Amino acid sequence: MRALTVCPGQAGSIDLETVPPPPLSDGAVLVGTLALGICGTDRDIVAGKYGWAPPGGDRLILGHESLGRVEEAPAGCGFARGDLVVGIVRRPDPVPCAACAAGEWDMCRNGRYTERGIKARNGYGSELFRVEPDFLVKLEPALGHVGVLLEPASVVAKAWEHTLRIGARGADWKPRLALITGAGPVGLLAALIVKQAGMDVHVFDRNDSGPKPALARALGAAFHTTLGEIEPDVVLECTGANAVVLEVMDRAAPDGIVCLAGVSSGSRTLQFDVGEFSRATVLQNNVVFGSVNANRRHYRAAADALAKADKDWLARLITRRVPLAQWREAFESRPDDVKVAIDFTS
Ligand code: BGC
C-alpha cells in the first residue's frame, strides 16, 4: 500500500512510499483511508522540526487527522464494515501515569505517551490503517468528507471543556464574550463550538483576505484584524504566534480565562513586563493555561458539535482537497487555505 512517510528530524525526507500492509499489532479494526487533514504539526514534522519515528526504525508514517471507512472489524467490537470513522491520536503511556490510567491521556503526566503520526507510532497517512476499537470514533454517515475535521475539533472541544471547568471556580461565572485568535481551522472550529454554547464570539486574524472573514461571519461571529478594546471573558488563542500570545495574555476581563491552544513552532524573544502581567493577573483572578490533544470524551463532544453544524459551512473550511498522487501540493501554503486535506479516494 502507499503511505506518506518521513524521517523525523530530517527536512525534505517526506515521500510517498510503498510499505507493507498495517500490522495486526496496530489494532483489530482495518480501515480504508478516505482523507487525511494536514496541519501545522505535520508541516513542522516535514520541516524536520518535530516528530519521532517508531522504535527500531527511522521513518514515520505521517498523519494524525484521519477519516476512513471500516473494511474489517471483529464481531462485537462496536464497529462494522462501512462505518465512517476517525482514529484517536494519542495512546496512554505504558506506566501508566494516573491521568493515562483514567483514560485522560491528553493530560499525561510523564510525557511517555505516544501519538499516531507524530510521536513514536505510525500515523494514518496510508491507504489502509489498523486501530484498536477503543481508539476509534464513529461518525454520523451524513458528515461524509467533512468528518476529517473531527480531530482538530476534538482539540477545541477539550480546550473549551477545560476553560469551563476552570471558570467553575467562581460562583455563577457565566462567560459572555469570547475572543478567538486565529481564523485557521482550529480557530474557526473554536468559533463554531463556542458559538454553539451561546457566546458572543469575536474572531481575530491579522489577515482579512480570502475566505476567513466570511466563514467567521457566517457563524454570527465578528471578525477583526486588530484587537482594539475588546475585554473578553474567555480567550482561545489558536495561532501559537508569539506576538499574539503576548498580546492576549493579559486581555481577559476580571475572573477571565486565557487558553493557549496553538502550539508555537519557533522561539522568538519579545519584551514582556512581568510585573504588570503578574499584578493584573493577581488582582483580576485571571488564569492563563495551556491545552493540548484530546481524549475520547472530547472526540465525542466534537462529533456532536460537527453533527449539529451546518454541513455546507464545514465543507467551506476544507479549501483544498488534493489527490494522493499530487500529495506534495498539500504541504504548500497558499494564501486562501483554511484546511487542506489529501484525498485518498481519487
Ligand atoms: C495534534 C494533537 C497533538 C499535538 C502535539 C497537534 O497538532 O492535533 O493531537 O497532541 O499536535 O503533538
Image: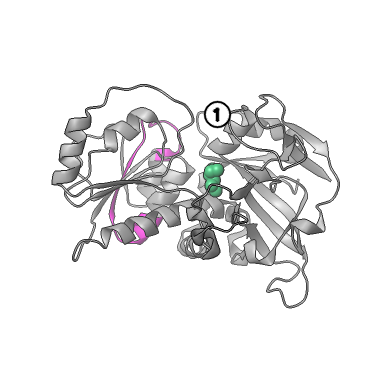
Is residue 167 toward the left or the right of residue 157 in the image?
left
Image height check: is 205 above or below 196? above
- In percent of width and height, residue 157 lies at 44, 57
242 or 105: which is nearer to us? 105
Query: Residue 225, can we see it?
Result: no
- In percent of width and height, residue 285 lies at 18, 50
User: Who's the residue at 81% across and 54% down the image?
Assistant: 23
Image height check: is 54 above or below 336? below
Image height check: is 10 above or below 80? above
User: Which image quadrant is residue 282 in?
Assistant: top left
Indicate whether residue 199 is drawn in magenta: yes
User: Which image quadrant is residue 131 in?
Assistant: bottom right
Indicate whether residue 19 is drawn in magenta: no
Is residue 109 toward the left or the right of residue 250 in the image?
right
Q: Quadrant of ligand 1?
A: top right
User: Who's the residue at 22% across and 44% down the image?
Assistant: 252
2 or 147: which is nearer to us? 2
Is residue 77 toward the left or the right of residue 252 in the image?
right
- In percent of width and height, residue 144 lies at 62, 58
Q: Which portion, as a residue range, is magenta?
A: 193-212
